[in-house]
Image: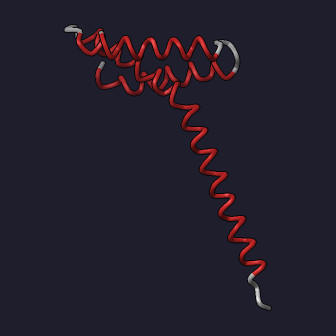
Amino acid sequence: MRRYRTRAALWIAVVEAALIIFGVVPRWPAFFLAVALIVFWAFVGRNVGRDTFRQVTWIGAASQIMIVALPFLLALLTFAAFVALAILAVVALAFLFLDRS
């Protein structure tokens, strides 16, 4: 199970993201469930003696971290794109106004 846990977490995150995007699962309950699963893994799942339970809780927490981190990552990338666009606009204006011909 340890070998495929990252792949399983990724597929769970993809399916859950699709359900959230298409409105099948409401956003805020999914967010609270994600936080609850991450906290459960942090306090219980890591310390359990049975390997299968530990792996299942890891998969659940990792998939929820992907779901929670995705909006923040998209906001960061959007901000970076706007900054890059602003820099390009300033450079283009500089080329236009500083053209001596």
- Residue 20 x %, y %: 64, 19
- Residue 58 x %, y %: 35, 18
Instruction: Please give left or right for residue 51 compared with residue 88 in the image.
Output: left
The C terminus - image quarter? bottom right
Q: Quadrant of residue 24?
A: top right
Instruction: Please give left or right for residue 46 compared with residue 67 in the image.
Output: left
- The structure residue drawn at horizontal position 41% and vertical position 23%, both measured from the top left corner, is 62
Q: Quadrant of residue 17?
A: top right
Q: Is residue 91 above or below residue 76?
A: below
Q: Nearer the viewer, residue 64 or 40?
A: 40
Instruction: Please give left or right for residue 90 compared with residue 45 in the image.
Output: right
Q: Nearer the viewer, residue 89 or 21?
A: 89
Q: Is residue 95 above or below residue 31?
A: below
- The structure residue drawn at horizontal position 28% and vertical position 10%, both measured from the top left corner, is 52
The N terminus - image quarter? top left
- The structure residue drawn at horizontal position 63% and vertical position 17%, both measured from the top left corner, is 27
Q: Nearer the viewer, residue 17 or 46?
A: 46
- The structure residue drawn at horizontal position 68% and vertical position 58%, both measured from the top left corner, is 85
Extreme residue in the right direction: 101
Q: Is residue 35 above or below residue 98?
A: above
Extreme residue in the bottom direction: 101
Q: Quadrant of residue 6?
A: top left
